[in-house]
Image: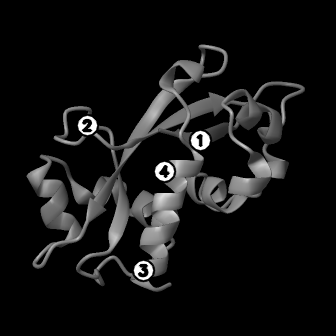
Amino acid sequence: MSRRLLSLLLCALLLMLAVPAAVFADGEDEVEYYAVPYVIQNGDSFTRIYERWGLRFEKYAGRICAINAVEDLDVLFVGATYLLPTTAENLDTDVYVTVMSHQMRGGETAYDVLADYGIDYNENVELLQRFNGGRDLTKIQIGEKLLIPVV
């Protein structure tokens, strides 16, 4: 995927999923992690970025791959924007995606839960699948976690 297309997709994600924080469905959902848009600078590596944040990159490597649809974390493009997952709340940034965790209950569908957040499933299915490890969200079962990115 070209870095320009990746940057455009990430910007579209932030716009499409712009849901006010107060909408957090039934109040039982919890913050799973945050995803911070980060523009790669000359000399950056994921390890260095996470070290600057006081975090271990290895903890987040799998999520970086899934969210950004990349396979090789050693290949970064200067100027490209990546969504970087973190559990740290004190990063010096005003823009981030809050990824909520919803445990599925009987009678719920991913479509309905996302609608409660004001997110159109059909318009965002590819991005939602990325946040959920590529799973087919129509087959999510009772007791499984549905991750919901909101701004």
Q: Say which label, 3 or 2, has the lower sequence index.
A: 3
- Residue closest to the eye, 16 or 85: 16
| Quadrant of the rendered image containing residue 149 | top right
The residue under label 3 is: 4
Q: Percent from the top left, x then y, of residue 54?
A: 12, 46
The residue under label 4 is: 14
- The numbered mark at residue 83 is none
Look at label 2 and name its amino acid: Ala
Q: Percent from the top left, x then y, of residue 7?
A: 42, 70
Side of 105 relative to 102 (left or right): right
- The numbered mark at residue 88 is 2
Q: Secondary structure at mark 1?
A: strand
Tag 3 near tag 4, CB within 8 Å? no
Look at label 3 and name its amino acid: Arg
The residue under label 1 is: 147
Q: Give the Cα separation between the discs numbered 2 and 1.
A: 18 Å
